[in-house]
């Protein structure tokens, strides 16, 4: 069996010995696809109600400002 393996930015063909029964498809993208389907359904329902759902990720906004004083960090 030949699989593709990434080595230092290159994709190389690598031969491995494995039984076909032991190989499963990668599930790494399943959560992403589930999220996409849910968002599509929510947007579809919001569009039917003529409301805007907006983006799925809300930005946190800027953090609170503060100043560092030199006296606090100077060793005595």
Image (spheres, grey):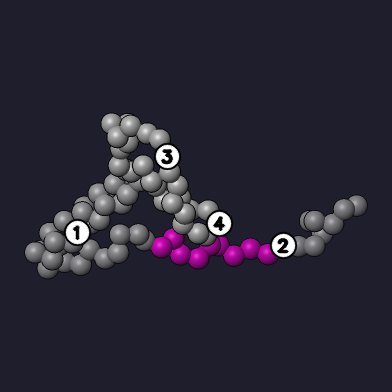
Q: CA distance from mark 1 to mark 2?
A: 46 Å
Q: What residue is shown with label 1?
A: 40
Residue 60: image x %, image y %? 44, 60
Q: Furthest residue to the left? A: 48
Magenta stretch contains residue 14: no
* Image mark for residue 8: 4
Answer with left or right where residue 17 lies relative to residue 7.
left
Q: Is residue 76 left or right of residue 49?
A: right
Q: Position of residue 32 (x, y in %)?
A: 31, 51
Q: Earlier in the sequence, mark 4 or mark 3?
A: 4
Q: Secondary structure at mark 3?
A: loop
Nearest the eye: 8 or 51: 8
Q: What residue is at 80 percent from the left and 56 percent from the top?
A: 73
Q: Position of residue 64 (x, y in %)?
A: 55, 62
| Element marked by disc 4 | loop
Say which of marks 1 and 3 sits in front: 3
Q: SS class of the residue under badge 2? A: loop
Q: Which residue is mark 3?
A: 16
Q: Nearer the viewer, mark 4 or mark 2?
A: 4
Q: Residue at x 26, y 65 (%)?
A: 54
Q: Nearer the viewer, residue 29 or 21?
A: 21
Q: Which residues are magenta?
A: 59-67
Residue bearing mark 2: 68
Look at the magenta stretch and give its main secondary structure: loop
> Residue 23's mark?
none
Q: CA distance from mark 4 to mark 3?
A: 20 Å
Q: Residue 20 location in percent, x, y?
A: 29, 34
**Crowd band around label 1 with a 10 angstrom C-alpha radius: few (<14), some (14–19), many (20+):** few
User: Gap in Å between the C-alphas at discs 1 and 3?
Assistant: 40 Å
């Amino acid at each position: 069996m030949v699989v593709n393996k990434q080595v230092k930015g290159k994709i190389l063909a690598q031969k491995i010995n494995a039984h076909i029964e032991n190989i499963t498809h990668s599930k790494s993208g399943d959560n992403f696809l589930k999220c996409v389907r849910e968002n599509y359904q929510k947007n579809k329902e919001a569009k039917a109600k003529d409301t805007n759902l907006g983006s799925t990720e809300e930005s946190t906004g800027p953090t609170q400002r503060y100043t560092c004083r030199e006296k606090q960090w100077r060793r005595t």
